[in-house]
Image (tube, grey):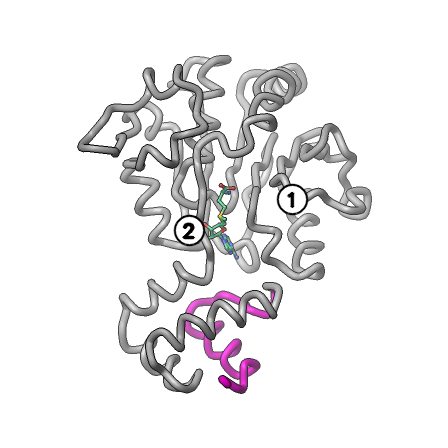
Amino acid sequence: MLNDYEKFKTDVYKLTKIDLSCYKERQMKRRIDSLISKKKIKTYDEYITAISKDKEMLEEFVAYLTINVSEFYRNPEQWKLMENEMFPYLFSKFGNNIRIWSAACSTGDEPYTIVMMLAKFIPINRVRIIATDIDKQVLAKAQMGIYDEKSLKGLPKEYITKYFKKVGGTSYQISEEVKKCVEFKQHNLLKDPYPSGCNMIVCRNVMIYFTEEAKKVIYKKFNDSLKKDGILFVGSTEQIISPGDSGFSTYKSFFYKKM
Ligand SMILES: C[S@@+](CC[C@H](N)C(=O)[O-])C[C@H]1O[C@@H](n2cnc3c(N)ncnc32)[C@H](O)[C@@H]1O
């Protein structure tokens, strides 16, 4: 029904710097068309005019198209591996001052999980994580640090007891000492310069939305961001088909080592 998606992509890029041609097209177009029809808007041009004038509508659009579902300790098996094997590996390779980047961190569940786990190994006041996402709304939520019990359902009780306070019926506030360890920044994986000198990059459940070409570029940039022997931790449906092409070898399922 809606036509001229090519022009729409160019207009969206001008407005948001989000390059829709790097996202899998069928899936993305279906989502966008469904949002636009719900608003009873008939053409892409009309929608672009509307979001150009209305900041809230623009933010709603960005939040909608970036899909930001997250939870603490998502895929527990991988986090257990992180605790039992990956952190000991990183400390043995790099010492105690490790630099970790949580890319596409959404509402902060992932970087905060890393902090709580790292604090089992080193004093919490020495833990520093960089956490980035393209979507300002999720970053604001991350900085607030208030979560519904649903996002904590998989998190081991020991962390909930130690680092959360119940605030209201089903909400929990994460402690200041955990919040202080994370530096949140807006960052577009498709466009912005990447941090350098990382010992580990955690980037999960976003690569699935990108085209194969975009993924290749991103893996290469992750590789450049890591120190030699540094680790890239990916999502449970995001195994890299030919890791060697981007300078990685498989260390464990979902964990890749920079060669
Ligand atoms: C499904 S969430 C994953 C959150 C978390 N990593 C996890 O696995 O629970 C995907 C996140 O990717 C972010 N995202 C989408 N496109 C992005 C881009 N080009 N650059 C940076 N972040 C992006 C979204 O805003 C969203 O918060």
Is the stretch drawn in magenta largely helix, strand or loop?
helix
Percent of width and height locating residue 254? 67, 35
- Identified by mark 1, the residue type is Thr
Residue drawn at point x = 36 percent, y = 47 percent:
139
Q: Are marks 1 and 2 in contact (CB under 8 Å)?
A: no
Tell me which segment is drawn in magenta. 1-22
* 33 relative position to 50: left or right: right
Q: Residue 2 colored magenta?
A: yes
Q: CA distance from mark 1 to mark 2?
A: 25 Å
241 relative to 135, above or below: above
Percent of width and height locating residue 173? 26, 30
* 25 relative position to 33: left or right: right
- Identified by mark 2, the residue type is Gln
* 8 relative position to 108: left or right: right
Residue drawn at point x = 53 percent, y = 83 percent:
7
Q: Residues within 10 Å of mark 2 (few under 14, many from 20)?
A: some
Quarter of the image holding residue 71? top left
Image disc number at residue 153? none
Q: Residues within 10 Å of mark 1 (few under 14, many from 20)?
A: few
Residue drawn at point x = 46 percent, y = 43 percent:
105
Percent of width and height locating residue 39? 33, 76
Residues 221 and 136: in front is 136
Q: Which residue is mark 1?
A: 237
Image quarter where the C terminus lies is top right
Judging from the image, what secondary structure is the residue with disc 2 in? strand
Q: Which residue is mark 2?
A: 186
Percent of width and height locating residue 194? 56, 48
Query: Which circle's residue, 1 or 2, is located before the other in the chain?
Result: 2
